[in-house]
Image: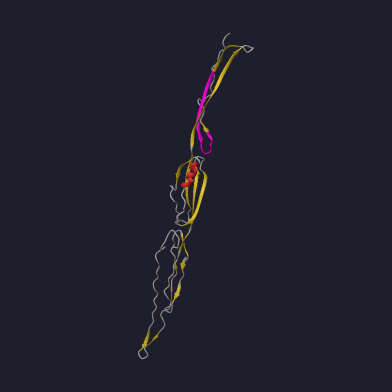
Amino acid sequence: YADGLARTGKAADDYTAVPLEFNRTGKHDDVTETDSWNAWIPGSASFAMAQSPAIQGYTPDHAQIDAVSVDANSQDIVKTVTYSADQQKMTVDFIDDTEGGKVLKTVTKTGGSDEAVGYNTKADIQTFVDGHYKLDRDTTNGKDLVFDHDDATDQHYEVHLTHETAPINEATSTNQVIHYQVSDGTQVAKDYTAKVDFSRDGFKDLVTNADHWNAWTPNATQTFDTVMSPAK
């Protein structure tokens, strides 16, 4: 693997080709103490092309080592194939379940295969909690995230949030007052009074500050009783 990657060391086992052998014959002159050689057999030979192994999430600098022709005078051939990490993509969506799945924020990260992302959801979740959201579930489980090495599929996580609420209630009354008086305004009998009380409860959405009320109790239309005017 290339320097600086999450993975280190050998990417795959070394490939060693079957050695190519060259032979020659000759004769030795015992008088002159010299050797006379015939030509090498074979005169040349070739190492076959070697395909670099596929490693998910990594790309070799040589997809293959091409066939190479050698002869008896050639040195041993040593090649190194270096693998670099492919780019991966990750997204984290923060979703408002109270608002029907509205995406509040998307965090997008890119980096090399198997590298640490350098991100977790804790700080972003706290920001939402400070704004009166509640954490429902986090598919990252709050862990420090790491890129995978799947080039075909981007990583995706979701953080689901709901709204904090607070209870609210109110009451009201409707009054009936009947005055008994003559035409000049003089009271001729004590006023008649009656009252009907109504109440209701509900909740305040602490994210939107909107109030949500249940029906009034009693929820049916109320009727004041018939009142007979006093005889005078």
Which residue is at 55% across, 20% downward?
A: 175
Locate the C terminus by quadrant: top right
> Is 183 situated left or right of 41 in this image?
right
Residue most extreme to the left = 30
**Quadrant location, the N terminus:** bottom left
The x, y position of residue 226, in whole percent, is 55, 16
- The colouring scheme, among rainbow, by chain, secondary structure or one colour, is secondary structure
Which of the pair 127/92 is nearer the observer?
A: 127
Magenta-colored stretch includes residue 206:
yes
Secondary structure mostly seen in magenta is strand
**Is residue 29 within the magenta segment?**
no
Residue sitting farthest toward the bottom: 31
Q: Nearer the viewer, residue 15 or 203?
A: 203
Residue 138 lies in quadrant? top left
Identify the residue at image location x=45%, y=44%: 137
Image height check: is 26 above or below 58?
below
Residue at position x 51%, y 51% from top? 108
**Residue extent of the magenta highlight:** 194-211
Q: Looking at the rendering, which quadrant does residue 179 occupy? A: top right
The residue positioned farthest toward the top in the image shown: 232
List x then y, in percent, for residue 46.
44, 74
x, y (%) of residue 79?
Answer: 44, 69
Place of residue 112 in the rendered image (x, y in percent of width and height, measured from the top left)? 47, 57
Q: Is residue 80 above or below residue 131?
A: below
Q: How many marks?
A: 0
